[in-house]
Amino acid sequence: MRKRNVIFRLLRALPCLIALAGAGTPAPAAWAGEADPAAPLGAGTHTLHLSHDGQPRKYLMHLPAGYDPAKPMPLVLAFHGGGGHAEFMADEARYGLVGKAEREGFVVVFPNGYSRLPGGRFATWNAGGCCGDARDRGIDDVGFVRALVARVKAQANIDGGRIFATGMSNGGMLAHRLACEAPDVFRAVASVAGTDASTGCTPSRPASVLHIHARNDTHVLFTGGAGRDAFRDASKVMDFVSVPETVARWVKRNQCGPAPRRILDRPGAYCEAYAGCAGGVSVQLCVTEGGGHSWPGAKTVRRGKEGASRALDANDAIWDFFSRASRPGT
């Protein structure tokens, strides 16, 4: 009986022993069935992997049908929200970024945040003060993004002067952090429903920043703080910075003029732009009256949630902003 109990305990401990044995082993550069990570890719959506800091990380990469390996294309990195994953952000009905990439002619990459689950679900980003396990474990997401951009450049012909970042909620917070810590990589960033969560921000050069937010957001409150629909465990988020404070920080960092100009004004939405910024960059704010914590213009409505605002299409606003930012001074 004692021998049987010992064997039983060993069997129960086996998964933990295996996990410990592999904990310090970096993931392979190429996963089973995956093409050479440095090999050029053709048009379509590819599921790829990258090992960074001993962590296996996944990303989806979409090259539009008009992709020509002989011609450099703009690159947009799109970061999912906290608790999401790459496939969720790549869902056309929820965000529509793949269709936008096809119409406008840019490469779009959907990285997966840090997750303890093998499939990468319920992932978060370390945006500084937020969020979840990525923040609590000090995951080097800025380093991961830098390595990812370098990898993508080896896989596709990317215009190094037209690399951009956007994100939803926690992913938008990471976009703000990238403008702080990697403006040498990203010419412009755009955040939707995710305010500045950086714990220190001294950019090496100016970067254009667009922030989009619904006035009635119930997760990241427009006036600051975590709303009723934020993470159930309050310790996994933060006392969110308000939208006005987020914009004011970027106006100061980029040395812009203090008075914004209204560039869009329609029922349910408006956009303002700050001019005279250092380096010819721009700071813009777009506000929707409705839509809650969602991507303006999205088609899918989650059960029990308010539908996305139809007064503004986030993809149109973001790509217009990125296109102008690729031509400094416009």
Image (tube, rainbow, N blue to C red):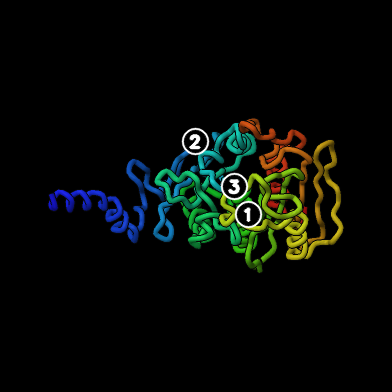
What's the CA distance linking mark 1 and mark 2?
28 Å
Q: Tags 3 and 2 in contact by the CB under 8 Å rule?
A: no
The disc, 3 or 2, on the residue closer to the chain's N-terminal end is 2
Give me the disc on residue 76: 3
Amino acid of disc 3: Val
- When the figure is inspected, residue 247 is found, relative to residue 316, above or below; the finding is below
Q: Residues within 10 Å of mark 2 (few under 14, many from 20)?
A: some
The disc, 1 or 2, on the residue closer to the chain's N-terminal end is 2
Q: What is the secondary structure assignment of the residue under circle 2?
A: strand
Is residue 15 something that shows in the picture?
A: yes
Q: Which residue is mark 1?
A: 173
What's the CA distance linking mark 1 and mark 3?
16 Å
Give the foreground label among 1 and 3.
1
Residue 328 picture quarter: bottom right
What's the CA distance linking mark 3 and mark 2?
15 Å
Q: Tags 1 and 2 in contact by the CB under 8 Å rule?
A: no
Is residue 75 something that shows in the picture?
A: no
Q: Which residue is mark 2?
A: 44
Residue at x-position 73% and y-position 46%: 213
Residue at x-position 75% and y-position 43%: 216
Relative horizontal placement of residue 91, taking residue 33 as reference (left or right):
right
Q: Residues within 10 Å of mark 3 (few under 14, many from 20)?
A: many
